[in-house]
Amino acid sequence: MMLLILICLQLSDRMALKKPKRSTDKLGQFLDFDRKVLRFYGYWDDRESLHGVLHDLELHYYLADDTVEIKENIQPNSGRDLGVMFLQRCKLPKVKFWNCLWNIVFHH
């Protein structure tokens, strides 16, 4: 009986669920998606704050290395500096959906 329990324990240790080893092919991704960019347009309404304005934004997602940048489109002769980058090109950290939902529901 004791031998059967030991065998079962050893088998359960071997059969324990493990995360799969996912090695991503970064070079292949770069070669496939070099110079390919997804572009999204949006805005940020900051008019409720003192001297706030409506910011016209452009988001670029680079497929080659999974990086993001956000820049502001400013009209000529608007009296503001041109070429403002809200977020320089960088990788964004992954956020779990439930953590994000928790923050939205309970902290606002």
Image: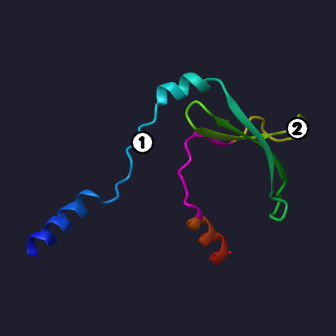
Whichever of callouts 1 and 2 sits on the residue coming sooner in the sequence is 1
Q: Is residue 16 left or right of residue 26?
A: left
Query: Which is more toward the observer, 9 or 102?
Result: 9
Above or below, 98 against 34 in this view is: below
Residue 47, quarter of the rendered image:
bottom right
Q: Is residue 102 left or right of residue 27?
A: right
The numbered dot on residue 75 is: 2
Which amino acid does the dot numbered 2 rest on? Gln
Quadrant showing the N terminus: bottom left
The numbered dot on residue 22 is: 1
Q: Secondary structure at mark 2?
A: loop
Query: Which is more toward the observer, 26 or 59?
Result: 26
Quadrant showing the C terminus: bottom right
Q: Is residue 51 left or right of residue 5?
A: right
Q: Residue furthest right?
A: 77
Residue at 60% across / 72% down in the picture? 102
Residue 23, quarter of the rendered image:
top left
Q: Secondary structure at mark 1?
A: loop
Residue at 63% across / 34% down in the picture? 62
Query: Which is more toward the observer, 42 or 65?
Result: 65
Which amino acid does the dot numbered 1 rest on? Arg
Above or below, 95 against 58 in this view is: below
Specify start and end residues of the magenta stretch as a single range.
86-97
Q: Give the x, y percent position of residue 63.
A: 62, 33
Residue 5 in magenta? no
Residue at 67% across / 27% down in the picture? 36
User: Cα distance, mark 1 to mark 2?
Assistant: 45 Å
Residue at 63% across / 77% down in the picture? 106
The numbered dot on residue 3 is: none
Badge nearest the viewer, 1 or 2: 1
Q: Give the x, y percent position of residue 29.
A: 54, 29
Residue 96 in magenta? yes
